[in-house]
Amino acid sequence: MAGGEDLDCPSALASAASSAGSPLSRLGSRRSVHRALGGGAVADVLLWRRRNAGILVAAGATAVWFLFERAGYSFLSLMANAFLLVVVILFFWAKSASLLNRPLPPLPNLEVSEKFVGKAADEGRVWINRVLAVGHDVAIRRDRKVFLQVTMVLWLVSYIGSLFNFLTLVYIGVLLSLTAPALYDKYQGHVDEKLGMAHKLLLKQYDNILSRGTRKPAKEKKTQ
């Protein structure tokens, strides 16, 4: 009896580990998505781990889109009026502070530091190198997977861009960036399965197109 119980213990432990591993695997997938987005404050906002910041970004994007697209404001006039209002408020605040012996406006040090410029340049260099690496994979290595991905993305951007203007497209991009990563983080297994099936189907169609293209010259040579 004791031996039977010992034999049953590993299976029980394995079943318990598998049942307890599902939340852990979900947590691991969430961490992978968080790392893919940079693993910083931006990733927290996109995954709605900072709900207040996410709501603020969505509300700000909606307000900007409404002002420019529905209310009829132009970007130049709105920015000029906003800066004019800020300058007038700061000027009269400083004047009244000097007359009434009050503190001046609490403005920060208005300059761009070299550290910030260097960090922005490094980030820009990383993205430029990624784009060049994709071009290298398509043109030199002839990677079919990368080629299909780039083709589909560019076709989708071209098709969607023909339906909306630039501002509406940016607004839709902001909303998608606030919803798509969170949904993918939650349903990553199902999404990966469907994307894998679609990728296999596209590769099969691509191979069929290539095989048809290689058969035509052979037939022409035989006729000649």
Image (cartoon, rainbow, N blue to C red):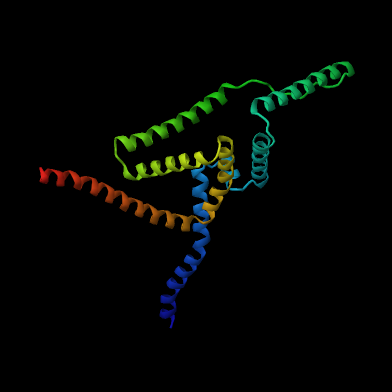
Q: Could you tell me residue 195's position as x and y percent? A: 42, 53
* 171 on left or right of 151: right
In the figure, residue 62 lies in which quadrant?
A: top right
Q: Is residue 118 above or below residue 140?
A: above
User: What's the residue at 68%, 31% (across, down)?
Assistant: 73
Which quadrant: the N terminus?
bottom left
**Image x and y of residue 4, in percent:** 41, 80
In the image, taking residue 217 as reference, residue 124 lies left or right, namely right
Quarter of the view holding residue 221: top left
Relative depth, front residue between 103 and 201: 201
What x and y, as percent, mark residue 111? 64, 20
Q: Position of residue 156 (x, y in %)?
A: 45, 43
- Total marks in image: 0
Residue drawn at 74 percent across, 22 percent down:
84
Instruction: Please name the residue shown 78% across and 21% down the image.
Output: 88
Q: Is residue 34 above or below residue 117?
A: below
Residue at the outermost front position: 223
Residue 201 occupies quadrant? bottom left
Identity of the residue drawn at 43% across and 76% down: 8
> Between 56 and 157, which is closer to the camera in this rendering?
157
Looking at this rendering, what residue extends furthest in the bottom direction?
1
* In the foreground, 21 or 128: 128
Nearest the viewer among 72 and 197 is 72
User: What is the quadrant of the C terminus in the image?
Assistant: top left
Outermost residue to the right: 100
